[in-house]
């Protein structure tokens, strides 16, 4: 029976065409395409992403894939691209990434940032990791599915956005001006999580699937007082008022409030720790555990930042002469709020903590925290595919402290997840927005296959 079952399986697999892919060739093609994509300089500002969208459109239409450009920012130079591989369900799986990149200072790099040069078995260039590399994995997935002639369950959409790195006006405009092009969204796969090597234990591979983002809230404090000559001290001094306010804020502790994502992140990593840490990590949803182990949980700044809304004092400005008491002193705070907290709630809390009507509190940026519930089918597909390529690796959900365009979909109620199968060390991750951004060629080749296999599994084509 085993033999017969195997033959049936081979026939079934052959019929889907999923195994007809020549992965060596697909990898070569991904490298060529990423080189060409990197060579289109989309530094934002000013962006100028349309030539990049044109390049991708040409590749897609040559494969017979339905594709068109949109104008989400009312700027012909900054268009987005949407391609569609039709499915049967009436729903859509949106694969999205952004075409703009952050600036690169050429003199600081050891390889030119916009030449797409291959050195030391790596492809160098701004955007190779953030997120032109991901865009190529997504594009190759559509292209390979199309060539194999498979029909996915859902419409598989490829969305390439401008302006993610500045203000997200591309994604915002896309949902405002063309809200219907995505149809009924089953799931969005975007940037935000990736494979990591050695971040917890040496050599250990962890794949993070981003399910939540903290909201960045910027606050400006203004303390008012009576101006005067410093030779006659007065009680109503804006400098004194501000220093008292900042002292109160810096001693204030926000409550520990781990989001659903953080609870399951810690649970997923618990096996890697020994008792009692492992016990604590498995029970972060218990207020008793949070209370008992608070100091242990919050001693490492990164872990602390996952567990609560954070407040960093980032600047104080005031005064202009040593012998003058100024009428006003300003200060700035960078706050990152967890899902469940709101910008207005934070403002009310700061007002209470400061407790002084001479200090005005103004929000200068109000990012909204956002979270999608963990998707069992996605986690299963990621787990199965990544464990074939990296036996012994772990898959865990992630809450990031920065924002991506996933926020716009999540605000609409759609489920969005950040995942890129590149496996990066801490140093490699630091090259995003840093110097010498690059992707290792073997990593890119493996990622083309993993991305395809994950989407294929979600879409019921191939295994
Ligand atoms: Zn970025």
Image (cartoon, grey):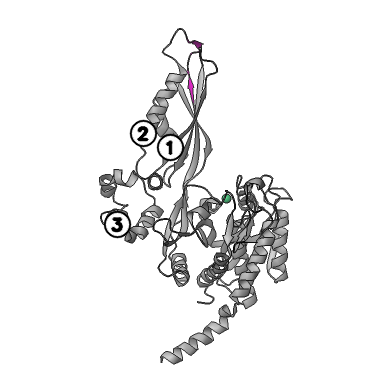
Q: Nearer the viewer, residue 86 or 114?
A: 114
Residue at 47% of width from left, 7% of height from top? Answer: 231
Residue at the spot x=53%, y=77% of the render?
A: 462
> Does the rendering let one see residue 180?
no
CA separation in Å, label 1 and label 2: 9 Å
Label 2 element class? loop
Q: Earlier in the sequence, mark 3 or mark 2?
A: 2
Q: How many marks?
A: 3
Q: Earlier in the sequence, mark 1 or mark 2?
A: 2
Residue in front for this viewpoint, 134 or 275:
275
Is residue 438 in sight in this rendering?
yes
> Callout 3: 10 Å neighbours few (<14), some, many (20+)?
some
Spot occupied by residue 61 in the image (x, y as percentages of width and height)? 72, 68
Asked which secondary structure carries label 1, the reply is: strand
Q: Which residue is mark 3?
A: 278
Position of the N terminus by quadrant? bottom left
Asked whether mark 3 lies closer than 8 Å to ligand 1, one says no
Residue stretch in magenta: 222-230
Q: Position of residue 323 (x, y in %)?
A: 51, 12
Name the residue tied to disc 1: 311
Q: CA distance from mark 3 to mark 2?
A: 29 Å
> Which of the numbered marks, if any, corresponds to residue 252?
2
Q: Position of residue 75 (x, y in %)?
A: 72, 48
Question: Is residue 250 rendered to the left or right of residue 91?
Answer: left
Q: Quadrant of residue 138?
A: bottom right
Mark 1 surroundings: few (<14), some (14-19) or many (≥20) residues within 10 A? many
User: Marks 2 and 1: in contact by CB < 8 Å?
Assistant: yes
In the structure shown, which secondary structural element does the residue marked by tag 3 occupy? Answer: helix
When asked about the image quadrant of residue 376, the answer is bottom left
**Label 1 or label 3, whichever comes before in sequence order:** 3
């Amino acid at each position: 029976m085993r033999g017969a079952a195997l033959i049936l399986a081979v026939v079934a697999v052959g019929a889907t065409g999923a195994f007809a892919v020549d992965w060596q060739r697909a990898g070569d093609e991904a490298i060529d395409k990423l080189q060409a994509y990197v060579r289109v300089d989309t530094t934002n500002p000013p962006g100028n992403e349309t030539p990049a969208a044109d390049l991708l459109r040409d590749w897609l239409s040559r494969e017979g894939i339905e594709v068109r450009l949109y104008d989400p920012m009312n700027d012909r130079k900054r268009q987005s691209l949407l391609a569609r591989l039709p499915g049967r369900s009436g729903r859509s799986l949106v694969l999205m990434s952004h075409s703009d990149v952050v600036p690169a200072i050429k003199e600081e790099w050891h390889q030119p940032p916009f030449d797409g040069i291959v050195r030391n078995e790596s492809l160098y260039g701004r955007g190779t990791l953030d997120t032109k590399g991901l865009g190529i994995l997504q594009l190759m997935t559509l292209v390979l599915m199309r060539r194999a002639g498979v029909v996915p369950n859902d419409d598989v959409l490829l969305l390439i956005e401008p302006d993610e790195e500045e203000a997200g006006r591309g994604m915002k405009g896309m949902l405002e001006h063309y809200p219907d092009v995505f149809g009924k969204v089953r799931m969005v796969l975007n940037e935000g999580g990736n494979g990591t090597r050695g971040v917890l234990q040496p050599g250990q591979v962890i794949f993070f699937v981003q399910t939540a983002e903290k909201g960045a809230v910027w606050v400006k404090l203004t303390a008012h007082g009576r101006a005067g000559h410093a030779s006659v001290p007065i009680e109503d001094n804006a400098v004194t008022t501000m220093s008292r306010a900042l002292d109160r804020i810096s001693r204030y502790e926000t409550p520990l409030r781990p989001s659903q994502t953080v609870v399951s992140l810690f649970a997923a990593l618990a096996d890697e720790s020994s008792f009692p840490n492992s016990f604590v990590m498995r029970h972060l949803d218990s207020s008793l555990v949070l209370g008992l182990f608070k100091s242990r949980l919050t001693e490492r700044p990164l872990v602390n930042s996952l567990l609560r809304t954070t407040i960093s004092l980032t600047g104080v400005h005031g005064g202009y002469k040593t012998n003058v008491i100024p009428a006003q002193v300003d200060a700035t705070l960078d706050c990152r709020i967890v899902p469940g907290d709101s910008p207005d709630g934070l403002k009310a809390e700061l007002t209470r903590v400061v407790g002084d009507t001479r200090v005005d509190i103004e929000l200068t940026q109000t990012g909204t925290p956002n979270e999608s519930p963990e998707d069992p089918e996605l986690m299963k597909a990621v787990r199965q595919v990544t464990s074939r390529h990296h036996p012994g690796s772990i898959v865990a959900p992630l809450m990031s402290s920065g924002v991506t365009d996933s926020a716009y979909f999540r605000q609409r109620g759609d489920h969005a997840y950040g995942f890129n199968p590149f496996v990066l060390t801490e140093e490699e991750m630091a090259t995003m927005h840093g110097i010498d951004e690059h992707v290792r060629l073997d990593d890119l080749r493996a990622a083309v296959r993993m991305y395809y296999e994950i989407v294929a599994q979600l879409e019921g084509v191939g295994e």
